[in-house]
Image: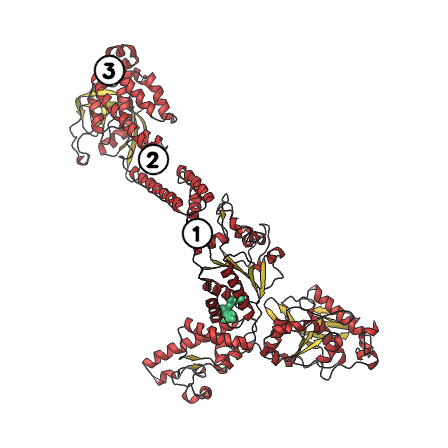
Amino acid sequence: MAAGSAIQIPTRLPLLLTHESVLLPGSTMRTSVDSPRNMQLVRSRLLKGTSLRSTIIGVIPNTSDPTSDCDDLPSLHRIGTAALAVQVVGSNWPKPHYTLLVTGLCRFQILQLLKEKPYPVAEVQQLDRLEQFTNGHKSEEELGELSEQFYKYAVQLVEMLDMSVPAVAKLRRLLDNLPREALPDILTSIIRTTNQEKLQILDAVRLEERFKMTIPLLVRQIEGLKLLQKTRKSKQDDDKRVVAIRPSRRISHGSITEDEEEEEDHDDVVMLEKKIRTSSMSEQALKVCLKEIKRLKKMPQSMPEYALTRNYLELMVELPWNKSTKDRLEIRAARIVLDNDHYAMEKLKKRVLEYLAVRQLKNNLKGPILCFVGPPGVGKTSVGRSIAKTLGREFHRIALGGVCDQSDIRGHRRTYVGSMPGRIINGLKTVGVNNPVFLLDEVDKLAKSLQGDPAAALLEVLDPEQNHSFTDHYLNVAFDLSQVLFIATANTTATIPPALLDRMEVIQVPGYTQEEKIEIAHRHLIPKQLELHGLTPQQIQIPQVTTLGIITRYTREAGVRALDRKLGAICRAVAVKVAEGQHKEAKPDRAELGEGEDCKEHITEDAKPESISDTADLALPPEMPILIDFHALKDILGPPMYDMEVSERLNQPGVAIGLAWTPLGGEIMFVEASRMDGEGQLTLTGQLGDVMKESAHLAISWLRSNAKRYRLTNASGSFDLLDNTDIHLHFPAGAVTKDGPSAGVTIVTCLASLFSGRLVCSDVAMTGEITLRGLVLPVGGIKDKVLAAHRAGLKRIILPQRNEKDLEEIAAPVRQELSFVLAACLDEVLNAAFDGGFAVKPSLEHLNSKL
Ligand code: ADP
């Protein structure tokens, strides 16, 4: 070391005893100081001293057992290394200690121990002559061949290391610049040697001896490195830097766990690679995956991309590229399953069977996508489930309601943080086969947003010509969706984007009649609810009249979902009774049973329903089965929600009942009108759309032009109905926006009633669009509207004549209970709406003649 050339070490040196390692001249070492003697040395010599000399200490390897470090000074090794303390760092954690950075200068020999406490100090003799090092040529000649040989090995060793590491490059330069005499010590401290070997080198005071001892160590290291490089190569691991530079890493404490972790992870990646190779993914996907796994191997684990890539590869392995269930399609069995699972809905079942039959014959899926359209709770989803059951396929429902981002369908690109595959690929991963039945629920509720149009993404999914190479953005490779059976559901076709609608075959699923609902309840819903609540038919009995009561007074819906919920509520209440009864049977105490009289109302004997109100035996435990009658209904479900208010509301002029269609099914709709003094203004309230407002204006214009004919006058007796008169038309249920042309006839009837002072028949409902000339035009949703009128207990329905064909769709029992008036013009409507007809002046009999 050039720096050491001028240094003459002091003759008295404080001694630092090191356990862990041996410091050789020319090398630097970090050592921890925590024994009392060494601590004292650091404190009083290194921290207090101010001169350069005071930073020179003697480092003596402590060869005795470190655990027996007691008060007595152990016998000291004879030779040590004089060192320069370069840095002192103190710390109190976990216990007070110093960390010293020392650089070895030269060997010394202890001549005499001068004092032992508080730290040992000895009189020493310098062994290596530092100044000699600078005079390289002379020593080279002296040692001749030995030094040359040593130098050759040293160069060979350094060249085996990775030159791109700065420390290695520096070492290579030092080899040429340093005097040869310094090399044995420096190289020994770099290569992998035991403390014992280092101690031997330290003790080799004669240079020649030192060279001789170091050469075998160098050779050993070179051989070791060669072996390592060979194994590395076979492992295709190019991370040789770490291994080569720090060959002793595996031995040193602490790094073992790190290595193990790395290895474990490496094993995981290897496993993943194996899985990828054995999975049956497409060629394209395999190529991408292998490329990714190659990247993964090179990536440090701490990189965020590592986790991303790994997740991606794991998904790719999990996807059912080639896994499918075997279809067991037998039309007769399919018919039985559909019939067993669902009552009524003949048209739907017929179409589904046709679809399945074609599949059986043709064995491919390139047919249109079925789309069930109808109000909620009519069994659209459950038919989808049955189809999966008949085919023996997995079923997966994808709810599309409110989806407004196309990446929901097609996934996010992997460049995004938190990117993930779309719902289709996710669904496939969940079911684990590539031929499930996917139910795309609520396709009419897809929304558009700035993030793109999800309906457009669905187009590709649903198109049989394209979906064999559906590319999810996350996967970025094509996945074959052609084996997936897609079924869509919607409440209305109005909001389904036309391009999407075009790819689907719409099957209307109308609401149920009361009779159908009763059958569905008794065949399917009640048994299902009983099972859900752990009840048996021996414990609860729900007669058909009660079910009818629930349907008419507690629900007003096209489907059976609310009915199902109400039945669930009844079962819950009965379950409490049954559980209580069991408890009471165990310890029948009559006094205790005297409470809770309210509930006793519906406790009755099987054969004697009258005894419900019989208070005499209130204290008895419930007799099985518990019969659910109207009292019980009121008890459990509360007072009826829908009363037959129709007749009450029609007890004054200016009210008529219309029929409206909503995505939730048909509904009856009241139209109210009143007149007051004013300037001929028309006020409309009740959340109306533009079309409805136009209908109102049309109706008034028609009535004004026909006022004389019908002898309609305003309050002052004038035929000009708006003269000094304001009209207010109101459509109750104001929270719901109403629009569409079908209320025209109802508004005319309502106003005719208002101006004539006559009551509209209380059991009549009507629907139809009007023209200015008084014609009645056909409208849609007839079946739902008729069912709504039937539900509300109305008897006569006025329909546009051209809607006659729609009546065929209505179930015969409903048709029989209703009378239909088919009207072509408004005269016919008015005649049917009022008892005894609506008088028309004979001379103006023909409407058309007026125009
Ligand atoms: P949707 O998808 O049309 O909104 P669901 O399929 O969820 O309705 O049906 C609601 C409930 O009604 C389900 O439990 C279903 O089994 C039952 N259901 C509906 N229609 C029928 C039917 N015709 N026969 C038997 N159960 C039915």
Q: Nearer the viewer, residue 849 or 450?
A: 849
Q: Which residue is mark 3?
A: 146
Above/below status of 622 relative to 727: below
Q: Which secondary structure, mark 1? A: loop
Q: Which residue is mark 2?
A: 235
Left or right: 50, with 825 as reference point: left
Q: Nearer the viewer, residue 776 or 344?
A: 344
Mark 3 vs mark 2: in front: 2
Q: Which secondary structure, mark 2? A: loop
Left or right: 259, with 394 as reference point: left
Residue shown at 26% from the left, 17% from the top? 149
Residue 123: image x %, image y %? 19, 21
Q: Are marks 2 and 1 in contact (CB under 8 Å)?
A: no
Residue 328: image x %, image y %? 44, 62
Left or right: 758, with 62 as reference point: right
Q: In the image, what residue type sits under mark 2?
A: Lys
Q: Nearer the viewer, residue 472 or 138?
A: 472
